[in-house]
Amino acid sequence: GQQLNQSPQSMFIQEGEDVSMNCTSSSIFNTWLWYKQDPGEGPVLLIALYKAGELTSNGRLTAQFGITRKDSFLNISASIPSDVGIYFCAGLSSHSGNTPLVFGKGTRLSVIA
Amino acid sequence: EAQVTQNPRYLITVTGKKLTVTCSQNMNHEYMSWYRQDPGLGLRQIYYSMNVEVTDKGDVPEGYKVSRKEKRNFPLILESPSPNQTSLYFCASSITSGSGRHEQFFGPGTRLTVL
């Protein structure tokens, strides 16, 4: 099936630093979603992107839908300890939503106070 | 509160003993899905349902069954669990087509151990 390459796999950063992670695909997606998963919890939706080139913010988080529709990135500015967790990208290739959501394998973020 | 609920949250069972994990959503979503999450493998889809009485296999359906008799519920059934089904399971739901929005919302997870 389709696959998403998410990088980096893990990051260790100092509190206050900015973070950037990305997902790439060999095929086109029409929707990109970014989730965060805290330990022992289900993934929580952070940002949804629906148009190529779209740039959307949610507080200190900013995500962009790549122009080629084959990639997306997520930035976190001024990281804080509660940003710790696993961040997943997910892509949907169908406009109608009748194809499965494809997930990246996640970026594990650790923030050192 | 709009949410996806799963029960039980934790389950330890033995090989071959049939079990059901329930999933319910109160958002009137058409689309529901089951995933398993394993270290190093990420989230893998087991089964999904586009609407009532419509179910389809995902990437890893072997050993699982589902049913969608009503819109809000989507139980996951393991007829004869085996140790390789030890995993963290997530149910998810989303509204599809027409709205143009496809955000999936996840339940809190069910940690299953099969001895």
Image (spheres, coloured by chain):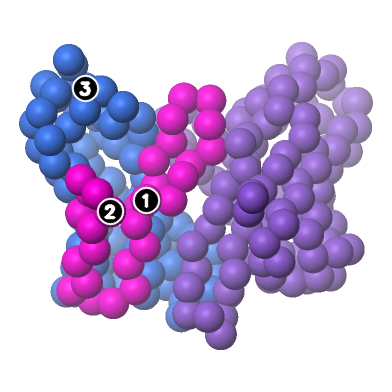
Chain colours: A blue, B purple
Residue beneath disc 3: A111
* Three-letter amino acid code at the position of disc 1: Leu
* Residue B15 spot, x, y in % from top left: 84, 21
Residue A75 placement, left or right of B33: left
Question: Is residue B84 something one can see in this rendering?
Answer: no
| A36 inside magenta stretch | yes
List the single residue furthest toward the bottom.
Answer: B98
- The residue positioned 13% from the left and 41% from the top of the image is A77
> Looking at the picture, which amino acid does disc 2 mark?
Asn
Q: CA distance from mark 2 to mark 3?
A: 19 Å
**A80 to the left or right of B94:** left
Query: How many C-alpha atoms fall within 10 Å of the one at disc 3: few (<14), some, or many (≥20)?
Result: some
Residue that badge 1 annotates: A46
Nearest to the eye among marks 2 and 3: give it: 2
Taking B29 as reference, is B83 above or below it? above
Write down the quadrant of residue B17 in the picture.
top right
Give yes or no for contact between labels 2 and 1 (Cβ–Cβ under 8 Å).
Answer: yes
Residue at screen point 23% across, 58% down: A57
Q: Earlier in the sequence, mark 1 or mark 3?
A: 1
| Quarter containing the C terminus of chain A | top left
Task: Examine the rendered structure and indicate whether residue A2 appears above or below residue A42.
Answer: below
Q: CA distance from mark 2 to mark 1?
A: 7 Å
Please report the residue visible at 21 percent of the width from the left and 22 percent of the height from the top. Answer: A111
**Residue under circle 2?**
A58
User: Which of these two is toward me, A52 or B77?
Assistant: A52
